[in-house]
Amino acid sequence: MTINHYLSTFAGLPVTAWHDEATADPAGVAWRLEVEFEEDGDFAPAFERLLEFCGPAGPTALVIGEWGSAYDQRFPFDLLISNAGRLSGLRSLFIGEMTVEQCEISWIIQGDYAPLLAAFPQLERLWIRGAQNLAVGPVSHGALRELVIQSGGLPASVLRGLLDSDLPHLDRLELWLGVANYGGDITVDDLAPILSGRAFPALTHLGLCNAEIAEQIAAAVAAAPVVARLTGLDLSKGVLGDEGAAALLAGQPLTHLESLDLSHHFMTKEMAQRVVDELPGVAVDVSDPQDETRWGRYTVVAE
């Protein structure tokens, strides 16, 4: 399974291509900036054109897709960092939003986000796709409220960098853990600082998604202290089945949640309905059921 579509909205704003300047309000959209993979030298001019159009504060939200050859060279962090003064209005950033036709998610070369976060102390939302050469921390950042990392396999080293960071206002964390064949070596024990509630004191929405260890995660979440303060829990896109769902229902109460996302799952119809029935006040998503009889269990994104 792969990613085949672009986002239509980001940070609550409609996504608009960088070369489509028909919009009257540059701050009223999330600008999507990308160049084709044959055009390595054209990313900087495209970026400059967007900055000139958006004015002295730059865009409010920026979605960056292909930067020329993402499978061959890392994202040009220095281009953003050196222009931080012209991006004072930037609050939401997504780097690496590409479809499988452009670049397999495991091929996207990222890098160290600590210098970028230091250069943008007002950034509130950061989404990252791809985990090759990825590092996020240790860093201290007082404004970041939402962090999403999408991968086919997330290394434990990335998680350790996050756990060593000081992110006092991080409210929403979503990690696509992926599979071992693509570098996803995070274990339930590695997640203990998050599940215990010690890490990220402001956290109210937790996503541990796209995981081949979804059953173990569900069992751990059933007794995790952090759950008591969550309003949203997302275990979607993974290989959750009846065993994990039963563990969730047998654990601590989940009725305080506003949402529970278990979509793309391997539960039986009976178990999926049981989850819905036992959590009547919760928006439970058990859509996209899968059949393991032919191909076994698989995550949404694993290539």
Image: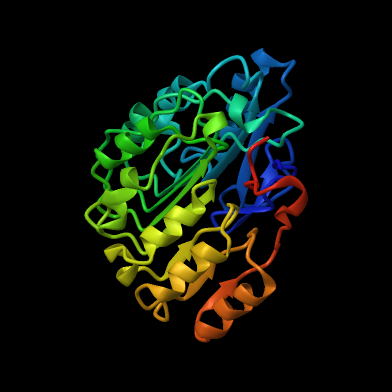
Q: Where, quadrant-wise, is the C terminus in this rendering?
A: top right
Asked where in the image residue 119 lies, by quadrant, the reply is top left
Q: Is 130 on the left or on the right of 41, as rendered?
A: left
- Look at 39% across and 30% down and name the residue there: 113
Vertical relation: 194 (above or below) 83: below
User: What's the residue at 70%, 42% (across, down)?
Assistant: 3
Residue at x-position 51% and y-position 21%: 76
Q: Report whether 218 appears left or right of 101.
A: left
The N terminus appears in which quarter of the rendering? top right
Counting from the top left corner in percent of width and height, residue 131 is at 50, 31
Q: Tell me residue 247's x, y (percent).
A: 44, 68
Q: Position of residue 293 (x, y in %)?
A: 74, 53
As displayed, is residue 141 above or below residue 101?
below
Give residue 136's position: percent from left, percent from top. 37, 33
- Labels in figure, total: 0
The answer to whether any part of residue 143 appears in the image is no
Residue 298 at least partly seen: yes
